[in-house]
């Protein structure tokens, strides 16, 4: 199956479908149970043509499990949610229980991550504000055993349940996606950019939007950690544009007859490529 949007935008990378299933798929990549890993690494593997699978026991880390929709996994950290509140902000060195929790987790994480836990990621100013951040997340506990990242062309529509379609877009393509997302709506705020971890921006945020009568698309991979991974592995400047499947169908149907067939878009493409 080919996406009309991907075709008309000449995307460098194939869209990725996020699926929910209770059946383990063959020929997939998956984190080993109990091993640390980042969901974004698996997302990049899917961009490169692999199918990646996650379960509640193989989600890479508590943040990844939360971002994928396996409930509030931060509660399962040593030190619970409070540990994460210090990790994302000022670091365990400023927490009275920090040294104790640091000793517990040190054997299971890299030295780099251990130092980050001690000193804090400092993405949010204080632990109290991180707690508020967690309260704003659309926490979800999906009714599936597995979440799957799969290249869009490999999806079997008659057999597989697509929840979200994710596009990797450059700035011009992002402009087109924002325009197309609003093309057939009676309001002009149909795209959001929440501050969130990369896995949350492609996972629970569009998943939550899929439950709404008029879902919105979600621009993501804006967090610094995800940006580093994209730079290292894909070597280009892209953002994610995650579309709940219902909205994806709407946007696909609106390609024909839209601005994407007009002269202004064609001029932009010619200026970009140097081909008139």
Image (tube, rainbow, N blue to C red):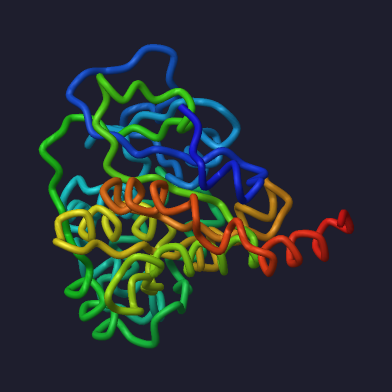
- Residue drawn at the location 69% of the way across and 50% of the way down: 232
Q: Is residue 35 above or below residue 91?
A: above
**Residue reaching furthest top?**
26
Q: Is residue 65 above or below residue 231?
A: above
Instruction: Report the quarter where the C terminus lies.
Output: bottom right
- Residue drawn at the location 26% of the way across and 77% of the way down: 133
- Residue drawn at the location 36% of the way across and 62% of the way down: 217
In this picture, residue 150 sits left or right of residue 261: left
Give how far across and how far down residue 186 sits, in percent.
Answer: 27, 75
**Residue reaching furthest front?**
257
Which residue occupies the foreground of this view, 120 or 252? 252
Which residue occupies the foreground of this view, 32 or 23? 23
Give how far across and how far down residue 204 sits, in percent.
Answer: 26, 55
Give how far across and how far down residue 35 sits, in percent.
Answer: 39, 35
Determine which quarter of the picture holds residue 211.
bottom left
Which residue occupies the foreground of this view, 240 or 188? 188
Q: Is residue 182 above or below residue 203?
A: below
Q: Note whether residue 104 is visible.
A: no
Give how far across and how far down residue 39 sits, in percent.
Answer: 43, 45
């Amino acid at each position: 199956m080919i996406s009309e949007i991907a075709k008309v935008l000449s995307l460098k990378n194939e869209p990725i479908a996020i699926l929910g299933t209770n059946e383990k798929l063959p020929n997939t990549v998956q984190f080993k149970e109990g091993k640390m890993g980042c969901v974004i690494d698996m997302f990049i593997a899917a961009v490169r043509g692999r199918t990646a699978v996650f379960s509640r026991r193989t989600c890479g880390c508590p943040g990844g499990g939360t971002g994928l929709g396996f409930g509030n996994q931060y509660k399962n950290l040593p030190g619970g949610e409070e540990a994460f509140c210090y990790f994302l902000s000022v670091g365990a060195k400023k927490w009275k229980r920090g040294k104790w929790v640091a000793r517990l987790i040190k054997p299971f994480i890299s030295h780099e991550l251990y130092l980050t836990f001690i000193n804090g990621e400092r993405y949010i100013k204080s632990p109290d504000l991180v707690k508020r951040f967690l309260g704003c997340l659309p926490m979800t506990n999906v009714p599936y055993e597995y979440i799957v990242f799969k290249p869009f062309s490999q999806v079997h529509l008659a057999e597989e349940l697509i929840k979200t379609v994710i596009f990797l877009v450059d700035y011009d393509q992002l402009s087109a996606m924002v325009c197309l997302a609003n093309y057939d709506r009676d309001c002009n705020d149909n795209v959001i950019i929440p501050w969130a971890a990369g896995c949350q921006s492609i996972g629970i945020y569009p998943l939550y939007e899929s439950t709404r009568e008029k879902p919105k698309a979600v621009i993501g991979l804006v967090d610094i950690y995800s940006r580093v991974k994209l730079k290292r592995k894909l070597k280009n400047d892209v953002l994610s544009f995650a579309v709940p499947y219902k909205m994806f169908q709407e946007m696909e149907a609106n390609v024909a007859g839209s601005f994407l067939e007009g002269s202004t878009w064609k001029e932009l493409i010619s200026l970009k490529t140097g081909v008139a």
